[in-house]
Amino acid sequence: QGQLVESGGGSVQAGGSLRLSCLASTYTYSGNCLAWFRQAPGKKREGVASIMISKNIIYYAAAVKGRFTISRDNAKNTVYLQMNSLKPEDTAMYYCVADRSCAFLGPGLNPPSVSADWGQGTQVIVSS
């Protein structure tokens, strides 16, 4: 079983920045694809960014491209999401997801497979 622990959420004003971190167990991190998904109240869950750890292949949702950056630190088994120029519509619970099938690796950021591992989520609130 994988383990994912998110951190770094908080409240910021529009235009501000936050960096989310996702610490994964070694088993979960290695040979995997990881992604950030988010869900706002009353809205469907959506993919934000995904990364293939072994090849550093990256995809972004159109809504965040140019503002968010996903990156990895192999020495720390950690994936980051740097979020700049935040907007009120970025307000959501952000989840880190690991999926060996890499279902979400692609421009469409498809939903993860049923066997994917999820973190507990970290809240991001952006005020106008």
Image (cartoon, rainbow, N blue to C red):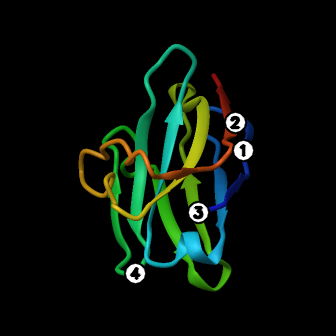
* Observer-nearest of 120 and 114: 114
Q: Amino acid at mark 2?
A: Gln
The residues bearing labels 2 and 3 have C-alpha atoms spaced at a distance of 15 Å
Q: Amino acid at mark 1?
A: Gly
Marks 1 and 2: CB-CB under 8 Å? yes
- In the picture of the structure, the residue carrying the numbered disc 2 is 123
Q: Secondary structure at mark 4?
A: loop
Q: Amino acid at mark 3?
A: Tyr
Among the two numbered marks 1 and 2 on one chain, the one whose residue lies closer to the N terminus: 1
In this view, the residue farthest toward the top is: 42
User: Vertical placement of 43 versus 29: above or below?
Assistant: above
Q: Position of residue 44 (x, y in %)?
A: 43, 23
The residues bearing labels 1 and 2 have C-alpha atoms spaced at a distance of 5 Å
Q: Dot 3, crowdedness within 10 Å: few (<14), some or many (≥20)?
A: many
Q: Nearer the viewer, mark 1 or mark 4?
A: 4
- In the picture of the structure, the residue carrying the numbered disc 1 is 9
- In the picture of the structure, the residue carrying the numbered disc 3 is 80
* Residue found 52% across the figure and 37% down from its top: 38
* Observer-nearest of 77 and 31: 31
* Residue found 59% across the figure and 29% down from its top: 91
The residues bearing labels 1 and 4 have C-alpha atoms spaced at a distance of 26 Å
